[in-house]
Amino acid sequence: MAIPKFNETMLPILKLIWDEKEYTLNNVVDILWKEFNLNEEELSLMSSNGWGQFYNKVGWWKSYLKQAGLVEYPRRWFFKITKEWKKVLKENLDEISVSYLKKYPSFIKFVSWNKSDKQYDEISNDFTPSELLDKWYKNIQLTLKNNLLDQLKEINPYYFERVILELFKKMGYWDFEETPKSRDWGIDGIIFQDQLWIDRIYTQAKRYTVNNITEKEIRNFIWAMSWDVSKWIFVTLSDFDKWAVEKANSAKLHKIILINWSKLADLMIKYNVWVQVKNIYEIKEIDLDFFSWDEF
């Protein structure tokens, strides 16, 4: 079963802790993942903040229900239901949604940014704020990747090869050497893993924009390699067909790395090649260690 949506977790948990006992977040997560029949793979999925996606979702649930007055924190780390929840229980609800929580003035105040704002309607029944932030971030990254690809398609093929070599240098390779543009036997450059230029890697960059790289092109490049070089990297703005991938994986005397347009864009973004930082947003959370001292 897939990880439940945000609103799908609230009612099951409240029914689970109806006995007014005190629970920790770990208690609830341990019980709830079995309730939803989640497997180990689903539990291991991580959010961008470093917490497990399911753990993160239940944590937001607890925060929302506290703001609505349905749970309370009797002491550090623990929470339990309130008398208000007992009233809600009598309504025989199918689910508790964010829309339902907006019946409580304290929750409306919680989701309103300031006095000049209208009620903040972007709060979702399906996603936590952290998940919404992740989705927006992924959308921005995907747009950037596509824009980067469009720009790479427009540049001179020789300059494209130079960009690739500059990328490898930023990734930590010591230096590179461009091969002559005539009689290079398909080799666009040589990158060196050490400052003595002992360990070499051959590179080839194909600025294809439509056709995928085929098995024949991989085979030809292997043939062009000198026998004293066992590593090479093939980069393309398109992709590799399955036979090209199989050929690269089956090479016995060479280590072959294939980089398609998506992986290339990811690397260029990661190592700041042709991109720059536009905005930085700091997402902060309570430092629980600070509040663990007895004098506080």
Image: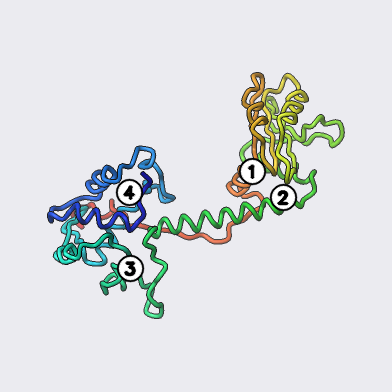
Count of labels in the image: 4
Pointer 1 residue: 264
Disc 3 residue type (three-letter): Ser
Q: Is residue 295 left or right of residue 223?
A: left
Q: CA distance from mark 2 to mark 4?
A: 40 Å
Between disc 2 and disc 3, the foreground one is 3
State which tag comes first along the sequence, 1 or 4: 4
Disc 4 residue type (three-letter): Tyr
State which tag comes first along the sequence, 2 or 3: 3
Pointer 2 residue: 152
State which tag comes first along the sequence, 3 or 1: 3
* Dot label at residue 99: 3
Pointer 4 residue: 55
Image position, residue 246 (x, y; %): 63, 27
Q: CA distance from mark 3 to mark 4?
A: 22 Å
Residue sticking out furthest to the right: 182
